[in-house]
Image (cartoon, rainbow, N blue to C red):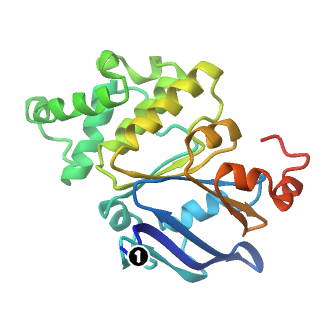
Amino acid sequence: MSDGVILETRGLTKEFQGFVAVNGVDLRVRQGSIHALIGPNGAGKTTVFNLLTRFLPATSGSIVYRGEDVTRLEPAEVARKGLVRSFQISAVFPNLTVLENVRVALQRRLGTSFHFWRSQRSLEVLDGRAMEVLASVDLDGYADTVTVELPYGRKRALELATTLALEPDLILLDEPTQGMGHEDVGRVVDLIRKVSAGRSVLMVEHNLSVVENLSDTITVLARGSVLAEGSYAEVSRDPAVLEAYIGVDA
């Protein structure tokens, strides 16, 4: 990695039948930082995430992760290298317990995800590590709870736990506080700060108070292009950023 940069895009572009959704984006995420990607609706933020995790192929440009060009890799290969994404909509198994959800993620890391014929006893060797992961997001007291019974904010914490079970170096968080009440937002902000220790985080987030609270660096997108970049104090004073957010419920 050069200059402590864990993830870099160079001229990243995505076109859909002539519509340019992401237009020449240059992004540099530093090792150990929390980097926010913000912008009005339709700015291209989620498309950038889909490109970074290879859910979408780039039309042009490159993605370099830990010094390696990963632009053409399969999504699973990118995840195995330590670049792991959580989603805007909670992606957990509702009818499994909280512990079982994390255990599934641990199996994935071990390459045994689809060994459904394994006995319950053989999977219990993962319980110790699963409990450690749950404790890191303050869910160890919910281990035996069926996930569908969790409050919404706790489900998002569980999703974060399943992401951590994959032992990522860089976590991509897509709208981690979307749809939450004030109390849950505060809890998730604290969790993100806690789990970011020793890791890097790139997040898309509409709640600007969350962005201000957490972010070391902010990149502002508008119409698929980088509009501004810097600290919250810098970008919040930028006239172009203020204009882009006029009429936008941030």
Instruction: Report the residue marked by disc 1.
Output: 70
Residue pictured at 90% horizontal, 49% vertical: 246
Question: Could you say which quadrant of the image residue 129 lies in?
Answer: top left
Residue 75 x %, y %: 41, 65
Q: Is residue 109 above or below residue 58?
A: above
Q: Quadrant of the C terminus?
A: top right
Q: Residue furthest bottom?
A: 60
What's the amino acid at mark 1?
Answer: Val
Q: Is residue 156 visible?
A: yes
Q: Is residue 92 visible?
A: no
- Residue 40 vs residue 63: left or right? right
Q: Residue 36 versus residue 94: which sits nearer the camera? A: 36
Question: Could you say which quadrant of the image residue 74 lies in?
Answer: bottom left
Residue 90 x %, y %: 52, 37
Q: Secondary structure at mark 1?
A: loop
Residue pictured at 51% horizontal, 30% vertical: 188
